[in-house]
Image (cartoon, rainbow, N blue to C red):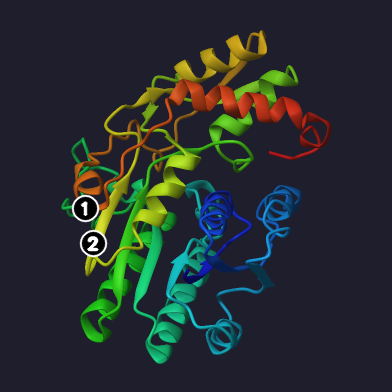
Amino acid sequence: MSTYLVTGVAGFIASKTAEFLLNAGHTVVGVDNLNDYYDVRLKEYRLSNLKDKHNFKFCQLDIESREDVEKQFKHHSFDGVINLAAYSGYPYSLVNPGIYFSTNVNGTINILESMREHGVKKLVIASSSSVYAGQTMPFTEDLAVNEPISPYAASKKSAEVLCHSYHALFGIDVSILRYFTVFGPCGRPDMCIFRFIKWIAEDQPIQLSGDGTQSRDFTYLEDIARGTIAALKPVGYEIFNLGGGNNPVSLNQIIQWIEESLDKKAIIETIPFHKADMNATRADISKAESMLGWKPEIDIKEGVLKCVEWYQQNQSWLKDIKL
């Protein structure tokens, strides 16, 4: 069995990825700074599902600290690193762009430097479908994504290019994963499905950007975790789309499924569509299928219903989560 460093381990995607690795018998050293970008109770909930496993070790640290990152590499012998620690989403990047670059770029430098110094040769790192803004759909990995329209997308593109430099110079094997609108139980409260469920369940108005016809290639959390682990294989330096498979679903359809599941009607308030947002995303996932043997398995509607079920089971404390 192998030992992996998973950064941002209390996060939405990283916690599920760590869970799958642990269940397969691997050792996971998980690190997270447990910041308050959103309610820490969600992060503590995810961590609680990992801490009872004997092969899980947790350390609270910030990957922006070169010294703290280096300590982990001195104390452990890693077979690979899965770097999922990041500030995500474009809206907050318009308010505080600096923190996106200090974490998403400088934090990545710290990890790459420790990998170089300690001879760790495999890195899997999260990128985003946001880098495709303005490109022709369906999005393929070979598109020139040199015109990001948000600091968030720019930070992700910067990390991709940085990783290529370390691959070319030091032989680090890198899998870049461009995630497409990941959703699932215990998701981030700044993402639409969590917000829509909470608002409808509590009879609060939905804040809907635009008319709801915008669509996303939604991808269920467990599928993303499987794809992340599949990307640990040696590839050299490759970029992979992990998405729903050129199968976009509109926000209006998501709302309808939630309404039906909760047996409640949404109260909808429209807000202006932001120019940094994207009207639609469609992922060409043929490369991930051919090279990683990965494709999504969970139907989007089934996934939405799982999210509603989880919310109802935990509504006693979720009702206090601020959006």
Residue 281: numbered disc: none
Quick check: 198 above or below 50? above
Q: Nearer the viewer, residue 173 or 101?
A: 173
Quick check: 161 above or below 134? below
The residue to which callout 1 is attached is 291
Residue at image point 41% right, 39% down: 277
10 Å crowding of disc 2: few (<14), some (14-19), many (20+): some
Residue 124: % across, % down? 38, 64
Q: Quadrant of the C terminus?
A: top right
Residue at image point 34% right, 78% down: 121
Residue type beneath disc 1: Met
Tell me the distance, in whole angstroms, between the alpha carbons under discs 2 and 1: 10 Å
Quick check: 321 above or below 5? above
Residue at image point 22% right, 70% down: 236
The residue to which callout 2 is attached is 238
Q: On the image, which quarter does residue 184 sit in?
A: top right
